[in-house]
Amino acid sequence: MKVNVVKIIAALAIFSSGLWMAGLGLAIKDQFFYEASSPVKKISLENVAEEKEDGFHIVALGDSLTRGTGDESGKGYVGYVADELQTKTKQTIRVKNLAIKGQRSAGLVSQLQQIEVQRQIKQADIILMTIGGNDLFQSGEALSNFSLERMNQAKADYLRNLHTIFKTIRHLNPDAVVFYISLYNPFNDLTDAKTTSAVVREWNFQSAEAAANYPNIIAVPTFDLFELNVNDYLYSDKFHPNKEGYKLIGERVASLITFTEGDEKND
C-alpha cells in the first residue's frame, strides 16, 4: 500500500513538473520568438497604455528597407532621419523600428493588430514606412516572368491592404504625420529597364493616390534619387540600397520635418 502511495505521489510530481516546463517554454517563446505568420491578438484602443516618455517619438514600419538591410553602418534611412532631426531639436529622438524583413502589405495589416505595435503607434510623433516592394517584385519573380494580369491582381491586393494600413494608423493615432516612402527601380540598368520603370512609376502613382485620401500621410518619392546612377546606391545584392542610398532617402525625409520655436513637434 505504501509503495502504491509513493508511486502516485511520484507520478503527480512528474506531471506537475511537466506542466511547469511546458508553461515556461510557452512563456519564453511568447517573449523572445516572434513569428510574423502566427495568430495576432486584437485590442481595443481603450486598453492601450496612454503613458508616454518624454522626447520626440519615431515609429518605423514595413519591410527590409525600413530595417536598413544593405547598410553596413546598420543605420538605414531611419537612422539617418533620426540623426538629421537631432540637429534640429534639443528633444531626445526616440526610435522604435518595428519593420520585418520580407514583409508584404498583408503582413503589415496583421502586425498592426498586435498590442505592442498599437501602443507604439499611439505614442508616435511621426511614422516612417516602406511597404509594397515585396508585393511588387516578389523576389524578382514577378518581373522575370512578367504577366500583366498577375501584376494587376498583385496591385489590386496591395492597394486594398494599403488603405487598411492607412485607416488603421489614422484610427490609432490621428495626429502623427506618416511618411510613406515610395519605391525606386533597382533594375534600372537592365535591358528591360523601360518596362520595369513604367511598372514602378504606376505603382508609386497609385500608392500616392491612396495616401492622398488620408490627412497627414505624405508619399515621399525616391525614384528620382536612384534613376541616373542606380548602381552607385545599391548594396551588393543589387536590390537594397547601400549606405549612400539610404542616406539619400533619410536626408529627403528629414528635410520635410521641421520643429517650431521652443522645440515643439513638427508642423
Image: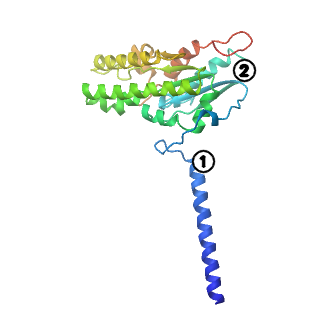
What crowding class fits label 1: few (fewer than 14 Cα within 10 Å), some (14-19), or many (20 or more)?
Answer: few
Tell which tag, 2 or 1, sits nearer the viewer: 1
How many marks the image carries: the answer is 2
Point 39% across, 27% down: residue: 158
Quarter of the image containing the C terminus? Answer: top right
**Residue that label 1 marks:** 31
- The N terminus lies in which quarter of the figure? bottom right
Residue 103 on image: x %, y %: 45, 34
Q: Does 120 appear above or below 15? A: above
| Mark pair 2, 1: CA separation | 31 Å
- Identify the image's colour scheme: rainbow, by chain, secondary structure or one colour: rainbow
Q: Residue furthest top?
A: 261
Q: Residue at x 60, y 53 (%)?
A: 27
Say left or right for 176 vs 231: right
Going by the numbered disc 1, the residue's amino acid type is Gln
Identify the residue shown where x is 73% and y is 26%: 54
Circle 2: is it few (<14), some (14-19), or many (20+) Cα within 10 Å?
some
Residue that numbered label 2 is attached to: 91
Position of residue 52 measured from the top left corner of the image (x, y, whole percent): 70, 29
Q: Is residue 61 visible?
A: yes
The image shows residue 264, relative to residue 114, as above or below, that is: above
Q: Tell me where residue 196 sits by quadrant.
A: top left
Which callout, 2 or 1, points at the residue further toward the start of the chain? 1
* Callout 2 amino acid: Gln
Q: Position of residue 12 (x, y in %)?
A: 62, 74
Classify residue 262 as left or right of residue 35. right
Per the image, label 1 sits on a secondary structure element best described as: helix
The label on residue 233 is none
- In the image, 233 versus 183, the foreground residue is 183
Element type at marker 2?
A: loop
